[in-house]
Image (spheres, grey):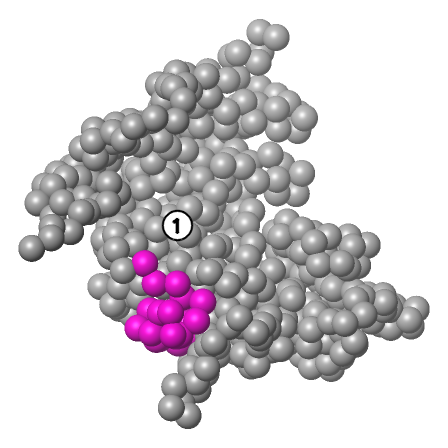
Amino acid sequence: MTKIRKSSIEIDKEEFRKVGYELIDKISDFIEGIDKRPVTPNEKPSQLQTKLGSSSLPQNGIPVNDIISKATDLLFNHSLLNGHPKFLGYITSSAAPIGALADLLAASVNPNVGAHILSPMATEIEKQTIQWLAEFIGVSPNYGGILVSGGNMANFTAFLAARTAKAPKSVKEDGISDKLTIYCSKATHTWIEKAAILFGLGTKAVRWIPTDHANRMDIEALESAIHSDVTNNYKPIMVVGTAGDVSTGVVDKLSDIATICKKHNLWFHIDGAYGAPAALIPEQQYLFEGMIEADSIALDPHKWLYSPLEAGCTLVKNPQHLIDTFSSHPEYYNFSNHENEIAQNFYEYGLQNSRGFRALKVWMTLQQVGRSGYQKLISEDIQLSEILFDLANEEDELEAVSQNLSITTFRYTPSSNRQNEEYLNKLNEEILNQLQAGGEVFLSNALVKEKYCLRACIVNFRTSEKDIKEVIKIVLKEGKKAHLKLSKI
């Protein structure tokens, strides 16, 4: 009997089991002790390159166990740990451990979730995940959509669907000839500028609407801008409302924006990449009134649903708009229906043809935590943000500036130079740089009414009230050091 020769890329069953168990043990220990590690080792690129080594591509293969041992050392000991309880920067959550298992399972089956025939069960799981996400934030489960890499791609996908739906029908063949305009507040994330550039409208098409005293889009200014553009033969197509702006967590007046979009027949898109999950919390639901009117919503499970990266989602009220935008049928595709049943092919819903199984980690985490579990976790994050604001407010040398959803901004204000805004901005920038390098706590920054602020966004199920109290102490310590340093210059 002829023995079948295995490829050199295969791993023997027993070896796979052995190295797999060892890796899971290491990951378990890493997760259990993550709070004992520094948030970041703060190593320079040159230090990391030295540790990684500069050898050429190996001529011959290296044993699997050696590769995994080296990789775990490099990543566990030389990474910024966004799962650390004192990582409060940007909007990157601690990752649910079940997500790591989900990614292992997804990579093992390796479905191409571009066409149903290539990923039958994975496609159905992604469809169900999208339905659950719509239910989660309180809109109709009939919204369709697609899982993408993150907020930029979720918003881009909706942007293109809006352009197809509201621009002249010839746009797909003739390109853009009309003077199309889009509207968003000055607090909108930078994705909108990228989209205008990449998708042919140009940055001059973006109308940056001023914000009110609460940093929400000024509704009267929006109405005025649309009226002015129509009068001057521009073609408004889309308004972007923000549900949780990146700097302060503010939610625009979505219901008012929806009314204006209906009046002018405009596409209503909501960038809820960060804040939309808070609509699950009864005490926060008033902020999201009007979200059910949105034509599209961007939502990032890898932000406040604690999914590992990458996991973004575009939800669209009428998913036919996605098909109208992205579908193509080249002769080399044979993704036909199954015995007269219509099979959904996700390549028709977005920019990718070949697609990984992002949905599995989201689907599994949603089931593990459940609706009530998420209500508790998200509520706790909001409460911790409120505690941070209150503690900052109690300190003579700290100024609590804003608190919305789970984002608090504050700054260090020493008794001397307290009235010198230029100095305070420079001082707090110096404090932030020291904090980000120090490894004790990681914050980011926000510019709020011209004040350079320290910004803490709590989307971290490991963060406790004890951590928040320690953050205050660390900021005060670093503030004093930075003030002393700058005073000598």
Task: Report the residue that reaches farthest toward the bottom.
Answer: 340
Relative height, residue 155 to residue 22 (above, below): below
Q: Position of residue 456 (x, y in %)?
A: 45, 41
Image position of 83 (left or right of 270): left
Within the magenta stretch, is there residue 129?
A: yes
Image position of 16 (left or right of 437): left
Q: Which residues are magenta?
A: 110-135
- Mark 1 residue crowding within 10 angstroms, few (<14) / some (14–19) / many (20+): many
Pick the quarter of the image with the C terminus: top right
Out of 401 and 292, give the one closest to the viewer: 292
The kind of residue on which mark 1 rests is Leu
Q: Position of residue 266 (x, y in %)?
A: 71, 76
Task: Report the residue that reaches farthest toward the top.
Answer: 488
Q: Position of residue 139 (x, y in %)?
A: 46, 78
- Rendered residue at 50%/63% (across/down): 353
Out of 206 and 386, give the one closest to the viewer: 206
- Rendered residue at 21%/35% (across/down): 64
Q: Position of residue 67 (x, y in %)?
A: 25, 31
Out of 16 and 28, give the one closest to the viewer: 16
Q: Tag 1, which secondary structure?
A: loop
What residue did someone put label 1 on?
309
Total marks shown come to 1
- Rendered residue at 39%/86% (across/down): 338
Magenta residues: mostly which secondary structure?
Answer: helix
Q: Can residue 92 be spotted in the picture?
A: yes
In which quadrant of the rendered view does residue 184 lie?
bottom right
Relative height, residue 400 to residue 417 (above, below): below
Q: Can residue 253 be spotted in the picture?
A: no
In which quadrant of the rendered view does residue 77 lie?
top left
Task: Report the residue that reaches farthest toward the front.
Answer: 1
Out of 285 and 169, give the one closest to the viewer: 169
